[in-house]
Image (cartoon, helix red, strand yellow):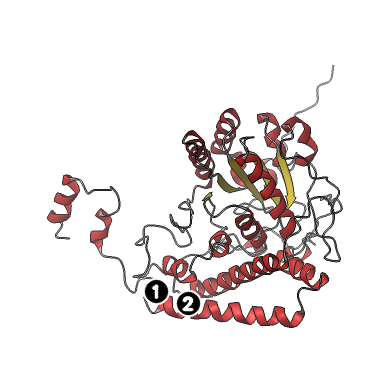
Amino acid sequence: MQQTALSLHIPEPAARPGDEPDFSRIAIPPPGALPRPPVDSPAVQLRDYAYGLVRVLDQRGQAVGEWDPRLEPDLLRKGLRAMMLTRAFDERMLRAQRQGKTSFYIKSTGEEAVSVAQAMALDRGDMLFPTYRQQGLLVARDWPLLDLMCQVYNNSGDRLKGRQLPIMYSSREAGFFSISGNLGTQFPQAVGWAMASAYKHDTRIAAAWVGDGTTAEGDFHYALTFAAVYRAPVVLNVVNNQWAISSFQGFAGGEETTFAARAIGYGLPGLRVDGNDFLAVYAVTRWAAQRARSNLGPTLIELYTYRAAAHSTSDDPSKYRPEHEAEKWPLGDPVGRLKQHLIAIGEWSEERHAALAAEVEEEVKAAQKQAESLGTLGSEPASPGTMFEDVFKEMPWHLRKQRQEAGL
């Protein structure tokens, strides 16, 4: 019998630099196609949600289907403002990095609905375990831009005293766990925090975010195992923005199936949602949060979106994807889509939008001026003596001795 020579499959994106952007492989169901299931639905009955796509906003900006959260216009305007403020903040900090005022920055352009809508769908006391593209969580929780900028600049106002890479924020008061460059760690830590909350009979849940590339790491699977076994009250989010640092999501397994489908093997509900649809993201997150609060266990959400900007200021996406690919993304821009919805329901206008854009720009400029008055990169480095602080609740004798010997 003649044998067939084996061949190895190497994932390859649909388009490379110089090619025309090609999203023809993406199947986008119409808004409202998936019904909203009861919160207590068994995971086995939710299989279709791991392969479909929850969408609410149609092409005319109208909300359709059972997933429409029917939010008040004031809440929608608050969400729009938070997304626009996040985007304006990103633009200013990118400019500051290019001017040498900070060493590094990561933008969230095109993904603002992920962080802002989810922050608004969760309770203020819930604990967040974010990645480095969720600054919108803090913006939506009204955390001061000045504090974020001081951390980026590593100036005298940096509460973290220069111990974190720029953009790796941390805020106990805002329920925002310290960002880690190794993204996979956030999932098991969130599950552990949620297990502890349940063990103490608390009422708070946890939420965590990773990118599509992180789903190929062991931490992702360890977290899902513990979450499923102990029914941890946690919302686990995979932000599928199509690209890891420079490799497309096929290398993490997204070419063969959806990332939400990974929940099925663990007996968990997995839902895919249009990550650029503010209403859909809010509704799915609210559903998952309610499920967790009802002691029905965790949910895995795949937020289907697109990283419009470079991975970071150290990245040049023109080296690995078509130059104008972001403009061709079929699910549009989250800010533009929510703006269109508000106009469609008679609660917004082009004039009010332009005024808001100018307002948030001035707010960011004012915060930047104040932050830079406290110093920028290298202008006022933290005292070497601070390296001994904040490691232990009470400084042990050997650290006190070392600090004394160093003359600090």
Answer whether residue 205 is visible to the viewer in this image.
Answer: yes
Q: Residues within 10 Å of mark 1 (few under 14, many from 20)?
A: many
Camera-nearest residue between 257 and 395: 395
Could you tell me residue 239's position as x and y percent? 65, 50
Could you tell me residue 84's position as x and y percent? 64, 71
- Determine whether 101 is above or below 56 in the image: below
Marker disc for residue 240: none
Amino acid type shown at disc 1: Thr
Q: Residue at x 17, y 60 (%)?
A: 408
- Determine whether 348 is above or below 113 in the image: below
- Front: mark 2 or 1: 2
Could you tell me residue 398's position as x and y percent? 17, 45
State the CA–CA distance, disc 2 to disc 1.
10 Å
Q: Residue at x 48, y 61 (%)?
A: 167
- Determine whether 153 is above or below 192 in the image: below
- Residue farthest toward the top in the current orientation of the protein: 1
Q: Earlier in the sequence, mark 2 or mark 1?
A: 2
Quadrant assignment, res 146: bottom left
Q: Residue at x 27, y 56 (%)?
A: 387
Q: Which residue is mark 2?
A: 368
Could you tell me residue 292's position as x and y percent? 62, 40
In this image, 327 relative to 361: left or right? right
Quadrant assignment, res 343: bottom right
Camera-nearest residue between 165 and 58: 58
Quadrant assignment, res 11: top right
Answer whether residue 324 is visible to the viewer in this image.
Answer: no
Q: Which residue is mark 1?
A: 376
Amino acid type shown at disc 2: Gln
Q: Residues within 10 Å of mark 2 (few under 14, many from 20)?
A: many
